[in-house]
């Protein structure tokens, strides 16, 4: 499943927002306390200006937020194995990178 998000309307989001609070959490292996079923792999991509070497906290926040949003659309209970990375795209005048956020949506039994 490949999902592309091209909307940049949510410039800054805070974790205290009600919309964010209702999203499925991202869980580590230690936090998984009960059996679950994998619903699918979530992959979201966007282009950003700047080299992959200069990833900032906001880039990671974007990745975690969209993984949680896409998991909510699927009806998932949580996201596991999150991965946020940037890969060099093209250099014309400004460096450009393709940001990819990937994780696994799960549903508890």
Image: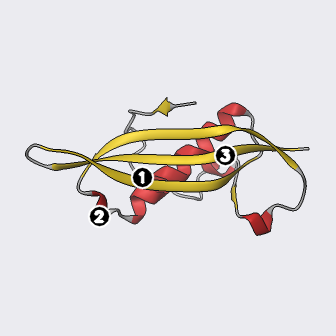
Query: Which of the two labelled residues, at mark 2 and mark 1, occupies the earlier sequence position?
Result: 1
Residue 104: assigned label: 3
Q: Which residue is mark 2?
A: 53
Q: Secondary structure at mark 2?
A: helix
Query: Which of the two labelled residues, at mark 1 and mark 3, occupies the earlier sequence position?
Result: 1
Residue farthest to the left, as pictured: 93
Q: Position of residue 51 (x, y in %)?
A: 24, 57
Q: Residues within 10 Å of mark 3 (few under 14, many from 20)?
A: many
Q: Residues within 10 Å of mark 2 (few under 14, many from 20)?
A: few
Q: Position of residue 11 (x, y in %)?
A: 38, 47
User: In this image, 7 relative to 30: left or right?
Assistant: left
Q: Which residue is mark 1?
A: 12
- Distance from disc 2 to disc 1, alpha carbons, whole Å, reads 22 Å
Q: Cβ–Cβ below 8 Å for labels 3 and 2?
A: no
Q: Along the line of sight, which residue is nearer the eye, 54 or 17? A: 54
Q: Nearer the viewer, mark 1 or mark 3?
A: 3
Say which residue appears at 40% left-offset and 56% top-offset.
Answer: 59
- Distance from disc 3 to disc 2, alpha carbons, whole Å, reads 25 Å
* Number of disc labels: 3
Q: Along the line of sight, which residue is nearer the eye, 44 or 18? A: 44
């Amino acid at each position: 499943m490949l999902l592309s998000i091209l909307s940049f309307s949510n410039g800054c989001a805070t974790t205290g927002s009600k919309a964010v609070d209702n999203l499925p959490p991202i869980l580590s292996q230690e936090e998984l306390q009960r059996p679950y079923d994998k619903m699918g792999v979530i992959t979201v991509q966007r282009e950003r200006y700047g080299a992959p070497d200069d990833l900032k906290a906001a880039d990671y926040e974007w990745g975690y937020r969209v993984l949680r949003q896409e998991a909510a659309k699927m009806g998932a209970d949580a996201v596991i194995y999150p991965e946020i990375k940037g890969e060099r795209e093209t250099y014309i005048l400004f460096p450009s990178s393709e940001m990819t956020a990937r994780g696994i949506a799960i549903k508890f039994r």
